[in-house]
């Protein structure tokens, strides 16, 4: 039963995240679907931890990319220099707080994806896509655990004894 719920949970979370992100017009809804799957762990506590780490790391990565870009791009710093500084900042944080490792590739992704638009705009778009999918993945896991709990309770209910005469 647990394996079946895991399969349906992952399928529902990815599909639901993709559908909702598409319905609200997000630029790259696939980031929502991927995030819903990335946070899905075997145990609910692990999923909760993954959700918190994913959101926090994403926000830190976006903030770092935007901050570095704001501070040094105006002086002609190349993309490579900006990525190097952003990763350096995030790596210092990750060394102390390993659970925010996602910040390392988030800052890189945001800076490297911003050729046609501003770093802030790219950061906001990717952030909303990732956070939406992350929350949906967490909610699907919590819902599947609640369903499993109800099903287990139903199995525990003893059969009624025949009436005594």
Image (cartoon, grey):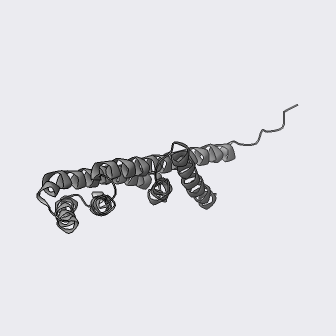
Residue occupying the far right of the picture: 165
Count of numbered badges drawn on the protein: 0
Out of 119 and 14, give the one closest to the viewer: 119
Residue 86 appears left or right of 34: left
Residue 76 appears left or right of 2: left
Residue occupying the far top of the picture: 165
- Image coordinates of residue 154 in percent, x first then y, are 68, 43
The quadrant the C terminus occupies is top right
Out of 77 and 13, give the one closest to the viewer: 77
Q: Residue at x 32, y 51 (%)?
A: 123
- Image coordinates of residue 138 in percent, x first then y, are 47, 48
Q: Residue at x 29, y 51 (%)?
A: 118
- Image coordinates of residue 83 in percent, x first then y, are 22, 64
The quadrant the N terminus occupies is bottom right
Q: Residue at x 30, y 63 (%)?
A: 112
- Image coordinates of residue 127 in percent, x first then y, are 36, 49
Residue 6 appears left or right of 156: left
Out of 141 and 129, give the one closest to the viewer: 129
Q: Residue at x 22, y 65 (%)?
A: 79
């Amino acid at each position: 039963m647990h394996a079946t719920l895991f399969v349906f949970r992952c399928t529902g979370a990815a599909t639901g995240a993709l559908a909702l992100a598409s319905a609200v017009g997000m630029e790259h809804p696939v980031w929502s679907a991927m995030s819903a799957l990335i946070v899905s762990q075997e145990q609910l506590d692990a999923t909760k931890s993954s959700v918190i780490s994913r959101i926090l790391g994403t926000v830190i990565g976006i903030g770092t990319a935007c901050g570095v870009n704001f501070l040094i791009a105006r002086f002609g710093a190349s993309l490579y220099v900006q990525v190097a500084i952003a990763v350096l900042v995030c790596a210092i944080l990750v060394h102390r707080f390993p659970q925010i490792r996602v910040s390392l590739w988030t800052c890189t992704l945001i800076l490297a994806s911003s050729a046609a638009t501003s770093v802030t705009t790219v950061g906001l778009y990717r952030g909303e896509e990732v956070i939406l999918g992350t929350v949906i993945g967490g909610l699907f896991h919590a819902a599947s655990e609640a369903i499993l709990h109800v099903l287990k309770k139903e199995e525990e209910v003893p059969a009624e004894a025949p009436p005594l005469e």
